[in-house]
Image: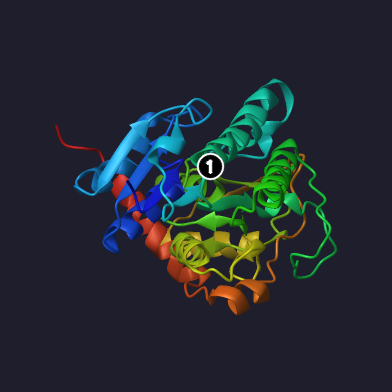
């Protein structure tokens, strides 16, 4: 059996967490379906280091069909990252994938946990997108969710599923709302990954909107540390925000990227997409109180670390 199971284990945050758990001496099972949202070769690259560890097992599988209950015992913790990401892609005909990967897969996972017959601890990677458009200011967990994208709606639906199963079956479940995560292994469709890619060639950096929108950019290692603390602390129950708690205008982050890369890339502005809120801003006091969450990496240092990783990614591989 395993100490921890990570769904979505080949992704940006899931692969980072798996390596952290292995470094702590845990036996880890990673599960990923390699959904074609972005190239599988990048996901396999994310997995490479963990696969070198004898305490890591990996299964390529659809979570809806995978018999997870056979891998659980009373002490196993589940970190549930698997899902369909992205706000812009959730509009239109692709919405069915969001329903399947964010709602149906979560329901199937919960059913497997119930079938296992003991209270396995499950920590769910939710999103600040459930808040949607809110008044300017920090958002606490008591704020009424107001998703303004189909993606945000499916993440909120998955949270409600977890609450239903937790109440009906007395399961120890936690949902963590992530705020604008960045850092090494960030998906290629995400803003900082694209900004660094454009800056590396001198291409125009495309900004959607004015650039004055506030974002609570949170470094991936801080997210991973918070998720691990929530999993191992019995006091953590229900919903928590995980963010930096110090939002900055998007253009401030772009300024850091231009300085870090030394680029003279011009800025091009386009209309903001549907579903893009004015502000994301996490009130993290509940997470700090209940499991000692304390983000440490500021935006400039985090961007330098992402650039160091992305330079290696951009470098042509020798044959």
The residue lying furthest to the front in this view is 117
Residue appearing at x 73%, y 41% in the figure: 157
Residue 150, image x, y percentages: 74, 36
Q: Where is the C terminus found, in terms of image quarters?
A: top left
Q: Nearer the viewer, residue 1 or 21?
A: 1
Taking the image as shown, residue 189 lies to the left or right of residue 183, namely right
Q: Quadrant of residue 291?
A: bottom right
Report the coloring of the rendering: rainbow
Residue appearing at x 53%, y 52% in the figure: 119
Residue 251, image x, y percentages: 63, 61
Q: Nearer the viewer, residue 112 or 29?
A: 112
Q: Which residue is mark 1?
A: 113
Q: Residues within 10 Å of mark 1 (few under 14, many from 20)?
A: many
Taking the image as shown, residue 88 lies to the left or right of residue 53, namely right
Residue 165, image x, y percentages: 67, 45
The residue lying furthest to the top in this view is 93
Q: Nearer the viewer, residue 203 or 26?
A: 26
Residue appearing at x 79%, y 70% in the figure: 137
Taking the image as shown, residue 236 lies to the left or right of residue 93, namely left
Residue 77 shows in the view: yes
| 114 versus 143 height, above or below | above
**Count the marks: how many?**
1
Q: Quadrant of residue 148?
A: top right
Residue 196 shows in the view: no
| 92 versus 7 height, above or below | above
| 67 versus 16 height, above or below | above
The residue lying furthest to the left in this view is 319
Residue 233, image x, y percentages: 51, 69
Residue appearing at x 47%, y 40% in the figure: 188
Q: Secondary structure at mark 1?
A: helix
């Amino acid at each position: 059996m395993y100490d921890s199971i990570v769904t979505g284990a080949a992704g940006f945050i899931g692969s980072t967490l798996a390596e952290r758990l292995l470094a702590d001496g845990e036996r880890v099972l990673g599960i990923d379906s390699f959904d074609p949202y972005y190239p599988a070769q990048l996901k396999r690259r994310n997995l490479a280091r963990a696969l070198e560890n004898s305490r890591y097992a990996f299964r390529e599988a659809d979570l809806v069909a995978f018999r997870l209950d056979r891998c659980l015992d009373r002490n196993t913790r589940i970190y549930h990252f698997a899902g369909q990401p992205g706000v812009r892609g959730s509009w239109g005909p692709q919405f069915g994938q969001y329903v399947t990967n964010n709602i149906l897969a979560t329901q199937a996972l919960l059913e497997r946990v119930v079938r296992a017959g003991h209270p396995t601890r499950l920590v769910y990677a939710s999103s600040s997108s459930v808040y949607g458009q809110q008044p300017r200011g920090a958002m606490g967990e008591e704020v009424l969710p107001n998703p303004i994208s189909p993606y945000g709606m499916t993440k909120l639906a998955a949270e409600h599923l977890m609450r239903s199963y937790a109440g009906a079956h007395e399961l120890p479940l936690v949902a963590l709302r992530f705020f604008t995560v960045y850092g090494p292994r960030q998906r290629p469709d995400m803003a900082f990954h694209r900004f660094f890619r454009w800056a590396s060639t001198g291409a125009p950096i495309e900004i959607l909107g004015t650039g004055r929108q506030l974002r609570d950019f949170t470094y991936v290692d801080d997210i991973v540390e918070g998720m691990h603390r929530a999993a191992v602390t019995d006091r953590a129950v229900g919903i928590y925000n995980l963010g930096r708690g110090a939002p900055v205008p998007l253009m401030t982050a772009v300024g850091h990227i231009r300085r870090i890369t030394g680029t003279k890339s011009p800025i091009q502005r386009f209309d903001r997409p549907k579903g893009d809120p004015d502000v994301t801003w996490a009130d993290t006091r509940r997470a700090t109180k209940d499991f000692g969450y304390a983000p440490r990496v500021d935006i400039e240092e985090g961007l330098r670390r992402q650039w160091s990783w992305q330079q290696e990614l951009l470098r042509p591989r020798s044959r």
